[in-house]
Image (tube, grey):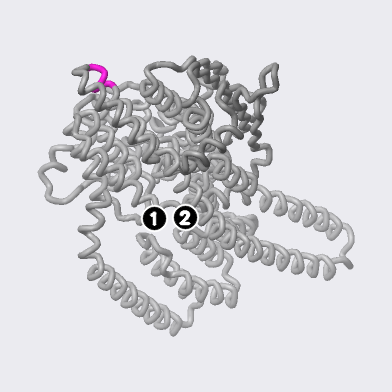
């Protein structure tokens, strides 16, 4: 499972989507009709409840009714009904009703991907609960707040809230304890701490196995524990765990999928590692069939793994089909992922402002305890502060919407440019010419190896084009494969020198993707192609939170290259410098100010052009 993923513990194919979409128009219309009918019924029932004289009873029954309808609602349909309930609870001054309603509104906003608004309502519920002794309410607040923070990739803060939820569990309610341990286990998947994931997964498993009627929670515990073992290559433990506690034969005999999508994905991972490729394909496809959410990240993993398996089996046509399906699917997922990135980048400033406000309020409360005549002034201050907080959230929300729209457009454009730059016809044409040469020479081994490297390069590039970021070792593999393919074209004339900081290989940090390779392409095509002795030097060094990449060649230089292009009327095959400048501009807007590009012309002792040196400073993404 990829680190970039966010699913249940971190929470179809395009052709399938096309086929299903023909039937979705009818089903979507039916779903909307059902929702409208449900809302009408809900409004009628709430109106009927209000005819009774017991106001607190109205609040309790209304909450129970709304909770029942919203539990499985994934689209946040019932927000308006909840706001009506909030007004009613305020009118009758029912604190518990207000807290419950705020929690439900927070859940609704989270499902709509309005993360900052969701956080605001969880914070309101938390503030109100400070004077309430019901531990169950506080457990629900910290559990849901932790889930929200997990979704916007704030793993440490999400774990803090899950730990807080553990302190509000009654000794008689072990199910909630098991649920909190399950959430703790899931929060370690994103940071690849699989020891901790297994540790808390075992705690959850041992508790939740005593609750057979809560089957979905137990399956999730088995899943987390098995997934941790798979990531540690303890495949026997994972297989034994699943075999002993999940009836896979019953699932295979059923006409319906009886397990959740993420569990089928884990079964696919296990069989993939066991090299049972046909079984892995079976479960990955079941995972795709079972997903109902519009854009779960596990879809990307399913499609990517299916492509890899078909490539291993030698079915390149199927492999490329799944990669194309993944590219199409990314269009749905990009905007939500970008919202999460921006929500994460803006969460800490909001938290800082909130802490400043809370500190001021505490100081004012100390004064009120000493001076009773300041009560009115303090009340006014609290009112103004609350209004200020609301205005801040509104301003941030508006700013986020504009920023998301602007950055999403820029990112999509630059990613497309980068992809075109790497997969340009000139490179592919030359690579296939080299392949043809090996075939004509009847050099089967070299032809097979060349085809393997070319398909691997295409797969790696398409696989990683989904994200703004890439692991360093993956980027290095793309670069090395590209240089090796080009070197074959020049009959191994390159004198290649690589200097790579060992710390970078061990740490394998995330860096911005699709920035380095186009400059190497420039060096090869526009610098070295006309030289008899071709020297290329690549250097990668870690400097604090920056990776400095140096690309140096002994080519003809930029001025001579431009002159040749005019004489030969060639098109400039690479837009590396312009595209890199655009990517750097976006990275700086997101907050990585030290990203930079510098190009130097090199000269020999006679002041003649002697190549080009490119220095790229890339941030390590935290």
Quarter of the N terminus within the rendering:
top left
Residue beneath disc 1? 332
> Splitting the image into 4 quarters, where does residue 30 fall?
bottom left
For the question of whether residue 277 can be seen, the reply is yes
* Disc 1 residue crowd, few under 14, some 14–19, many 20+, Cα 10 Å: few
Q: Please provide percent x and percent y for residue 28.
A: 28, 68
At 41% from the left and 68% from the top, the residue drawn is 77
Q: For the residue labelled by badge 1, is the local secondary structure a helix, a strand or a loop?
A: helix
In the depicted structure, whether residue 45 falls above or below residue 292? below
Q: Nearer the viewer, residue 333 or 391?
A: 333
In the depicted structure, whether residue 172 falls above or below residue 429? below
Q: Is residue 178 left or right of residue 22?
A: right
At 24% from the left and 27% from the top, the residue drawn is 436
Q: Please provide percent x and percent y for residue 415.
A: 47, 46
At 75% from the left and 69% from the top, the residue drawn is 383
Residue reaching furthest bottom?
Answer: 51
Q: Nearer the viewer, residue 539 or 397?
A: 539
Quarter of the C terminus within the rendering:
top right
Does residue 447 belong to the magenta stretch? Answer: yes
Residue beneath disc 2? 335
Q: Which residues are magenta?
A: 445-449
Residue reaching furthest left?
Answer: 253
Q: Nearer the viewer, residue 399 or 489?
A: 489
């Amino acid at each position: 499972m990829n680190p970039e993923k966010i699913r249940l513990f971190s929470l179809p194919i395009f052709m399938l989507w096309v086929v299903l979409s023909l039937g979705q128009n009818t089903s979507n219309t039916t779903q909307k009709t059902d929702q409208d009918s449900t809302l009408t019924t809900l409004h009628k029932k709430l109106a009927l409840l209000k005819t009774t004289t017991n106001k607190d009873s109205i609040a309790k029954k209304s909450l129970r009714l709304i909770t029942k309808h919203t539990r499985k609602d994934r689209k946040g349909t019932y927000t308006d009904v909840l706001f009506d309930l909030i007004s009613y609870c305020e009118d009758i001054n029912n604190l518990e009703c207000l807290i419950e309603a705020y929690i439900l509104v927070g859940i609704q906003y989270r499902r709509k991907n309005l993360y900052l608004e969701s956080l605001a309502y969880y914070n309101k519920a938390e503030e109100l609960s400070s004077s309430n002794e019901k531990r169950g309410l506080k457990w629900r607040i910290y559990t849901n707040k932790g889930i929200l923070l997990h979704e916007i990739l704030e793993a440490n803060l999400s774990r803090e809230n899950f730990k807080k939820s553990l302190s509000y569990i009654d000794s008689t309610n072990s199910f909630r304890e098991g649920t909190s341990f399950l959430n703790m286990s899931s929060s370690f998947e994103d940071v690849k701490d699989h020891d901790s994931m297994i540790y808390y997964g075992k705690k959850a498993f041992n508790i939740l196995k005593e609750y057979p009627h809560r089957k979905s929670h137990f399956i999730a515990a088995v899943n987390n524990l098995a997934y941790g073992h798979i990531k540690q290559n303890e495949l026997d433990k994972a297989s034994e765990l699943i075999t002993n506690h999940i009836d896979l034969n019953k699932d295979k005999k059923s006409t319906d999928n009886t397990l959740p999508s993420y569990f089928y994905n884990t079964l696919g991972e296990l069989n993939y590692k066991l090299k049972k490729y046909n079984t892995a394909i079976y479960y990955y496809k079941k995972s795709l069939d079972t997903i109902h959410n519009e854009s779960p990240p596990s879809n990307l993993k399913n499609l990517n793994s299916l492509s890899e398996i078909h490539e291993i089996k030698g079915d390149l046509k199927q492999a490329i089909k799944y990669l194309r399906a993944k590219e199409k699917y990314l269009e749905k997922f990009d905007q939500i992922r970008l919202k999460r990135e921006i929500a994460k980048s803006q969460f800490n400033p909001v938290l800082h402002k909130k802490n400043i406000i809370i500190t001021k309020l505490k100081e004012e409360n100390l004064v009120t305890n000493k001076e009773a005549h300041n009560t009115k002034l303090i009340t006014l201050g609290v009112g103004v502060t609350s209004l200020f907080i609301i205005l801040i959230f509104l301003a941030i929300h508006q700013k986020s919407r504009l920023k998301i729209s602007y950055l999403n457009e820029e990112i999509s454009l630059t990613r497309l440019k980068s992809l075109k730059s790497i997969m340009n016809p000139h490179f592919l044409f030359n690579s296939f010419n080299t392949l043809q040469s090996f075939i004509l020479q009847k050099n089967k081994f070299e032809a097979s190896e060349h085809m393997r490297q070319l398909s691997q390069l295409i797969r790696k590039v398409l696989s990683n084009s989904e994200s703004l970021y890439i692991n360093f070792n993956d980027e290095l593999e793309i670069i090395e494969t590209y240089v090796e393919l080009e070197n074959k074209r020049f009959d191994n004339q390159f004198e290649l020198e690589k200097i790579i900081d060992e710390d970078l290989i061990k740490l394998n940090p995330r860096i911005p993707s699709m920035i380095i390779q186009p400059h190497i392409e420039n060096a090869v095509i526009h610098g070295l192609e006309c030289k008899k002795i071709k020297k290329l030097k690549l250097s990668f060094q870690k400097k604090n939170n920056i990776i400095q990449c140096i690309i140096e060649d002994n080519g003809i230089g930029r001025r001579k290259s431009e002159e040749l292009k005019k004489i030969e009327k060639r098109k400039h095959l690479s837009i590396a410098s312009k595209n890199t400048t655009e990517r750097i501009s976006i990275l700086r807007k997101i907050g990585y100010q030290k990203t930079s590009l510098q190009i130097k012309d090199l000269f020999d002792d006679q002041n003649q052009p002697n190549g080009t040196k490119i220095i790229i400073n890339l941030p390590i993404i935290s």
